[in-house]
Image (cartoon, rainbow, N blue to C red):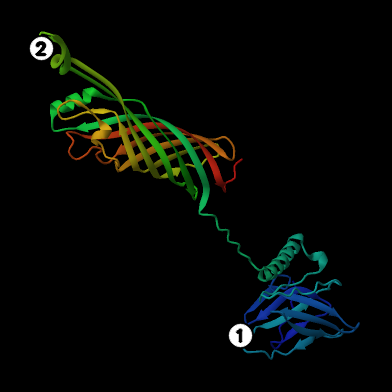
Amino acid sequence: LKHSPRTNNNHTINKNKIDAALITHNDTGEKREINLLSENNIAKRNEGSSDNSTYSMYKNNKPSLYKSSKEKNIQGSNEGKDNEPEIEFSARHPSKNILDPLVNNSSTQITAKPDENISATEKDQRKALLQKDSLSKNARNVKTTTITIREPIIKDLSLEVYFSPDIPVSQTSSANTAYLQHKDSTSKMQLSYTAGVKLSALFGEHVLAKVGFQYSEINEKFNYTNKNAVRTVPVVIQRLLADETGAMHVVFDTSNLIQAGTQYKLTYNHYKSIDIPILIGYETSGDRFKAAINTGIILNIKTSYSGDVLDASLNPIDIGSNSVYKSNTGASLYLGLSLAARLNNSFHLFTEPYIRYRLSNMTGTYEPFAQKINVGGLSFGLRYNLKNNRQHN
């Protein structure tokens, strides 16, 4: 690169030799070269008349004009601020096609080259800068609209109809050991059942709440045997008696005959209950198959009884007429595991093994024994979706 000599700290522009070099002089007299074709400076030639040409220096988007004549170099006085560097130009042959200076909002100085000297990489960089500036302006004008979708609290509302074969387990206690042995040998629990309906609601994705109405019947076989039984049998005896005249008359006389032997009695007892299940559960996610664990309480509304039971003297008595059991047996704990398969968007088929544990005693205060009857069952049922907010494939 050729540089014009430094004379009296003035700026010098040579018209016939425009070079892409810039020489700066700071306050200490140190000289530096800066390439005008870099991205920090812009030199532009403005064609005027045939004798004069004007060159523009763009710095921070503010043009500075320098003129040159055909016969001599134009020297600019260095009348700037003391801390401003001294600038000297030397020029080579300019190109006819000069790019207009790029104007942006930053303080970066960019030097424009002739079109034939601009590389493809620099063109892409300039294009990217222009696109980025355009996108930033458009982004400021875009209004953001936030749409809040409120999901319903209850996603699914279903009606369950079910039937369950049950196996009751009696838990009996007594202070009289002999009575307890006879009681346990006399009464045997039989296969029982439960039928009912439940309204099931799904909160969120997993939490279930259920409430319903059910009917349960516990069956018991009462088989009484007493080998030392004694019974009194009335016996009518016919006799012939003569009156005062000697006439014969037939007289009937009744006497009691005591018999010893073995007594047998077979009765099927029934404990019929109307209950309200109140349950809460957790259901897994799934499209075709679902599993859920349910727990809660079973509240008894009313229980009725029929059949026989041993009294304190080891004799069979009627349950209903002697009020052996309470009409309201209180609450029971419930624990079940449900497995369901989807038939279509409306129906599910499910099964649920469960345990029902009674919390309080069923018998009256003055009975010679205390009894609880717990139940283990296996429900089979059909679930119908009354409200379904979930999509299935």
The spot of residue 201 in percent (x, y) is 48, 47
| Residue beneath the point at 22% across and 32% down | 172
Side of 261 relative to 8 (left or right) = left
Q: As shown in the figure, which amino acid type bears the numbered disc 2?
A: Asp
Q: Is residue 227 visible?
A: no
Image position of 309 with respect to 78: above or below:
above
The spot of residue 148 in percent (x, y) is 58, 61
| Residue beneath the point at 73% across and 60% down | 121
The spot of residue 295 in percent (x, y) is 38, 42
Side of 167 relative to 135 (left or right) = left
| Residue beneath the point at 78% across and 69% down | 113
Which dot, 2 or 1, sits closer to the camera?
A: 2
In this figure, which residue is indicated by the disc labeled 2?
A: 243
Q: Which quadrant of the figure has residue 64?
A: bottom right
Q: As shown in the figure, which amino acid type bears the numbered disc 1?
A: Asp
In this figure, which residue is indicated by the disc labeled 1?
A: 27
**Quarter of the C terminus within the rendering:** top right
Which mark, by number, is residue 280?
none
The spot of residue 376 in percent (x, y) is 35, 32
The one of 87 and 376 positioned closer to us in this rendering = 376
Q: Earlier in the sequence, mark 2 or mark 1?
A: 1
| SS for callout 1 | loop
